[in-house]
Each structure stands twice: as C-alpha cells, then as structure tokens.
Amino acid sequence: MDTGDEGDHNSMMWNGDPCYKGLGMHSRGSWGLSLTEFFHFTFPRLQLQLAIIFIVTQSLHLLLRRFNLPRIVSEIMAGIILGPTILGRFGSIQTNLFPQDGEVFLDLLSKIGYIFFIFLSGVKMDPRTVLRTGLKAWTIGVIGVAAPVSVSIFTRRSLRKYVHRYRLPAYISIIALQNYVTFPVIASMLVDLKIMNSELGRLALATALICDLMTSFIGTVVSGGRIGQMADYTFGIIAQASVFSICVVLLIVFLGRPLCIWIIRKTPEGKPVSRVHVILIALLVLIVVLLSDNSGLYYQYGPFLLGLIVPDGPPLGSTLVDRLETMVSGLLAPLLVTYCGMKVNLAELFDLNFISFIWFILFFCSAMRLVAVFVPAVICRVPIKDAMALAFILSAQGVVQISFCYTNALNQTFDGETFSMLTTWIMLQSGFVNLVVKSLYDYSRMYTGYQKRDVQHTSPNSELRVLTCAHRLDDVFAVKKVLESSFPTTESPIAVYALHLVELAGRALPLLIDHQLGQKSSGGTRTQKMIEAFYSFEQQYSGLATVQQFTAMSLTKFMHHDICTLAFNKLASLIILPFHRKWNYQGKMILDSSSLRAINLDVLELAPCSVGILVDRHKVRHSSAPSSTYNVGVAFFGGTDDREALAYARRMAQSPGIHLMVIRFVPWDIYAGDNQWDAVLDAEILKDTRMLGARQENIVYREERVKDGAETALLIHAMEEAFDLIIVGRRHKDDTPQLLGLSEWNDLPELGPVGDMLAAADISKPVSVMVIQHQNVKNK
C-alpha cells in the first residue's frame, strides 16, 4: 500500500533536514558533559561513527571471509545492522549516534571516497589494451553488451503497457543498472579470488574493459537523448548543456594530459612523483567533479575520464595509486557501501506486489547477462566450466552499482523500498557469484602433472628446457653462470625461457610481454639490461642454446601464476627461482624480502615441473685467486629430490670445466626406510654415477658415515670451503637418521634442513647453493 506519507518519509530520508545552524563542531572536553550532550557535537560524533562502522565491518569480514564471502557483503551487512532494520529501531541509537541532521558529513566523506575510487580505477585502466585484446575478448564483450541492451529496449517498451507511469522510471533504471559491467568491480573480485593472472582472469579483465567502455558510451548517449526528449527544457538550454559538456570533456583531455606529461618530465628517472604534484592532481580531481556535476554529466564521469588520460605505470600512475590507494580503497570507498546499507530498511515494506516484480526483473536481467556471456564464450571455444565462471564473473556487482542506486535514490527515481531491495540484491548476488566462481574454477587444476617433466627423465641427448626467473640484474648473472655450467652442446642443447618479474604499479591489468614478438617492456633500464645479459648468453652459445625472453608485470602475490603458466605452456623441465636473500662483496646480507619468499613458496606448491631455488653468493670476494675449474658438490641422502639434484649435477659434469663430487651420507646403523622402491632407485642412480666416475676424471663419488644430524652439519659446513656450487634436494623423510635433530633448527622450510644450513645469513664464503624439488605429480 503506497501513501503520500510514505513519499514524504522517503523524501526526508534522502534530503535530510536543511537546518544545521544549531550544530556545535567541537566539544569542550569530556569533563562535565553527559553522554547525551557529547553526541550533540558534530566532530566527536563523526569520529565515533567512523570507528563503529570500521569495527563492525572488519569484525564481520573476519567472520565471513572464512566462508569465502567478499568484503562488500560485510560492508552492506554492517550498514543494515547499524541502520533502521536492526539497531536503528532503538530510538536512542538512531537519535543520538546516527541522527538525521548529522548524515551530511558521512554522505560527504563517502562521496569523496567514491570520487577518488573512480579516479584511481581510471588510472589503473589502459584504454590501449582494448586495441591489443584478441578476437575472443572482443566477441564476448560486444555480444555481452549488445544482447542485454537490445532485450532491455524491447522490455522497456513492453513495460509501458503494464506498469503505472509513476513506477516506470524505477523499472527502466533497474534494467539499465543490471546491464552495467564495471571494470573496477571485476578487477577487485579477481584479486579477492586470486585468479587475476590466470588465463580466465586475463580474459575476464580484457572483456570487462571492453564492456565497461561500451556501456559508459551507451549510457552517455542515452542520457543525452533522454534530456533532449524532455519537454521542460527549451532547445537553448539543451544546446547550452551539450556545449558545456563537450567543453568539459575537451578541457579534461587537452589540459589534463599535457599537465600529466609535464609532471612526468619534471620527475627524475627512477624517482616517485613529488608530493606537490600529487596534491595538484588531487585538486584537479575535485575541480573536474565540480565541472562535470554542473554541466549535466554524472559527477563521477569527469574523474573517471581524468584517470583514463593519466599515463598508467611509473612514475605518475604508480605514485598516485601508492599514495591514495590505502586510504581510498581501505576506508573512504567502503564507507559509501556501508552508508548505503544504513539506508536499507527491511522492517517496513509496503507494496509487496511491486517488490515481487522488482525481484522478477532482477532475476530476469541476471539470467539474460549469464546467457549473453556464456553462449559467445562457448562459441569462442572457452571450456564449458570456464565459460560459466566467466559469465558469473562479468555479472558481478559492487560499489559502482551501489553508487548508481544511491544517485537514483537521491534523485527520487527509487523510493526507500526499491533502494532497499536493490542493495540487498547486490549483497546476495556478490556473495553468490563469489562462491560459484570459486567452485567452478580451480586455477591449480591446470598445473596438474600427468607426464613427467623433470631432469631425470630428460634424455642426456635431448633438449633441456629451463625457465629462469629474475627480479634483479644480480639474479640474471647468477642463473647465467649456472646455465653456462650446464654445458649446452649440439647433442644436448638448452632452451632457456627467461622471465623478468616486474611488480605491477599504477595499473590494474597484469601484462605478460613476449619480447620475441617485438613487444617492448615498460620496466625501464633495469629490464633492458637483463634482456641484454641473456642475449649475450645466446650469442656466446649460438646454435647450442636458445633464449626466449618474457616480462611479467603483476602484483607480487600473483606472480607465481605467471611462472607456473609459462613453465606449463613451454613444457619446461626445471624452474630456477632466485633466493629471497642477497649478499654484498663483504658477505654481509643486504636484502631479505618476504614478498619474494612468498612467491617461491607458492611456486613450490603449484609448479608443473621440478623447481630449483638458487642461493647466490657470486658477489662475495674469494680469499684466494679464483680457479679455472668450477667445483660442484652434491650432498646425497636419498629420495626423489636428491635424485633430481644428482641428475642435474651429472648433466653439468659433461663439461670438462666442471669438477663434480657426489657425497653420499650413509647412516652408521642399518636403515630400511619407509619406501623400499626409493632405495632401489637411489641405488640405481648412484651405481650409474660411480660408473661415470670410472670413465670421467671430473666426477668423484664418496661415502661418509654419520651418526646423526650433528655430524652431518659438520661435514656440510666443511663443504662450504671446497665448492663453488652445492646442489641438494629439498625434502627428506622425517626419520632419516643422517638428519635427526636438524629439522628443529629449520627456519626456511622451502629449503629443507640441508639447504637451510647452507643458506644461513652469517655464511661469508663465496659458495652458492641450489635446492631442488622434484616435480609434484598430482592426481585429479
């Protein structure tokens, strides 16, 4: 039942009380004030409101993330709890803590947060990516937008016959809202699901970018056409608004772009943009909002366009994201979601027929969106499960849709009931989409190994495929020495896939650049020097070694996807990762990166082939003149990882410049072990090694009897003096007698007990270490 009183209530709900002159800003202090009087002062009350909103939101997120629900669910739910649905029904809380005359400040903060969120979303987007995306993304994106818009136009005409004209604008706005595919929401969702760098994630980002730009263009055209049809405006007013809008767009493009280029030129190479220039850009964002809002455009259109013309990446784009991202995305933008949740009133619903029809339209539009994406994806030969996951990803809704709902409520296109239903729908739909995509798409599934991709099962007279990863120029020099020691020959060539890892800054789209295709990296001088170092290696071993170079620009927490995907696609047998610690010439540790260590741990878990972590100390000065012979030692205890380490060392020993010593650590007591088959394989590879040693003078086999881990540690430390490179396996059985007691002192599990000893920070000798893990063969 709709009444005039309800309409007045909704109007008051969004417009608030215009009289604020009786409000006090600052309190006189807590002494002599009652709690009720304290709430009468605006600034302390605003601080308390923000603290309560933050605490409730974070508490809910800590609980709900265990069920794989996204943050937006917690933010909307926090607003519903604090709003009139639950706590707001207690008059004292509503009157004192969240009074209507104080909402203007929360409203202002949330809008400012959303403005800068949209601006940063534009900064992270690279419109040129649309031109570089493949036919698959274009096909899915164009059909995914065109089909729902076409059906929506037909649906609008049908609604005019059956819906009262008072309700018609709300229905039309709901349908238009469901057709929006927003890039910021999709990118945020993929980050939460940790699939941004997967094949599906890259396709979803490219498609979302195309859909976002198309829907924004269509929305602008439709809005302009709608204004032109309004009888209340004269031709002169419409022409004036159109000219003003065009001038605002031209001003943003032709003034903002040169300003950004000027700032970049003023910034020294390798340095971040100065604080003054960041403040200047932030001020320009606010000016652009003012111009857009007064020209007839949506107020968020100007900041988004300004963000698009800001060059992404370093120095300007990355600095803006670095300085503003935490405050904007962590506090201010979520505040808009919670604030809108506080406007939801599920306790007072009047027109149930109207509400039922709203839900019918929402389900219909959602199904239409799923079909419009799923069908072209299947036609483009995307696997059925991935196509379904892609359809759900592109139907995700978030803060952008919340903002449109809020704007329509302010314009009184939506009444309180409509706004409550739409906000609740966004909350439920966001949680459901997250759960469905997580169940449909398991990114680790693609790395599952069925065939053996390792060094052991690579024939000595066949090509060895190695994927090397480098964050710094030092990493390139270290792995280059290992590759040279691997002795590429005509009968046994080496194919090197060099992946330069660059942290993604100032953009949302991860990039995998293939330098063989003539693509250039924006990593700067550092990346170019790394490319040249590998190019010199290929020239040195021309015809014996081939090098293909790639640059992966990604968030650190997703870099392992690029590594594993490239290794999988290139059929690599070994991935060589740089260790997260670095030493200087004096043997003093100068770098200990937790983020690089996290990458190594993730690669060890997911890798489709064998993995080696290279602990490099090539910078440490020799106490004596360096020898022309490169001494390599293998510490052998038994097991699949040790056999893989020995297999790689034996390949190195084909070079006459390599002197290999294999030291087998044998327990004093008889040790049967848990797996007799492992013992048979160990005996077989050691027998072959002894036979090679009989034929080759540069291979020496030795056995050392030890009682426990203490004696083993003494011998391992003695090896540091004798070798340039020590190769060890990562994993061993827990009950191995030779290692008893060492696991208790293992600070770095990714290196195993032996590798951990050799990678100790206090070792000042020029010995490098490679810790090898054999391929994890998983069962589906």
Image (cartoon, rainbow, N blue to C red):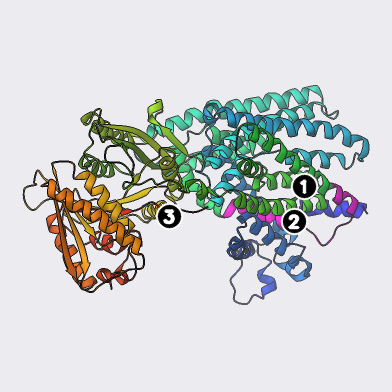
* Horizontal relation, residue 63 to residue 630: left or right: right
Find out whether the residues at labels 2 and 1 contact each other: C-beta distance under 8 Å: yes
Q: Main secondary structure of the magenta part?
A: helix
Q: Earlier in the sequence, mark 3 or mark 1?
A: 1
Look at label 3 and name its amino acid. Answer: Glu
- Number of residues whose C-alpha sits closer than 10 Å to that of mark 2, classed few (under 14), some (14–19) or many (20 or more): many
Image coordinates of residue 721 in percent, x first then y, are 12, 58
User: Is residue 509 in view?
Assistant: yes
- Residue, x 82% and y 53% (percent of image)? 417
Alpha carbon distance from label 3 to label 1? 49 Å
Residue 489 lies, in percent from the top left, at 22, 34
Q: Nearer the viewer, residue 487 or 743?
A: 487
The residue tagged with tag 2: helix, strand or loop?
A: loop
Residue 469, horizontal then vertical, whole percent: 34, 43
Boundaries of the magenta span: 331-357
Q: Quadrant of residue 375?
A: top right
Which quadrant would residue 227 be assigned to in this image? top right
Q: Is residue 487 above or below residue 746?
A: above
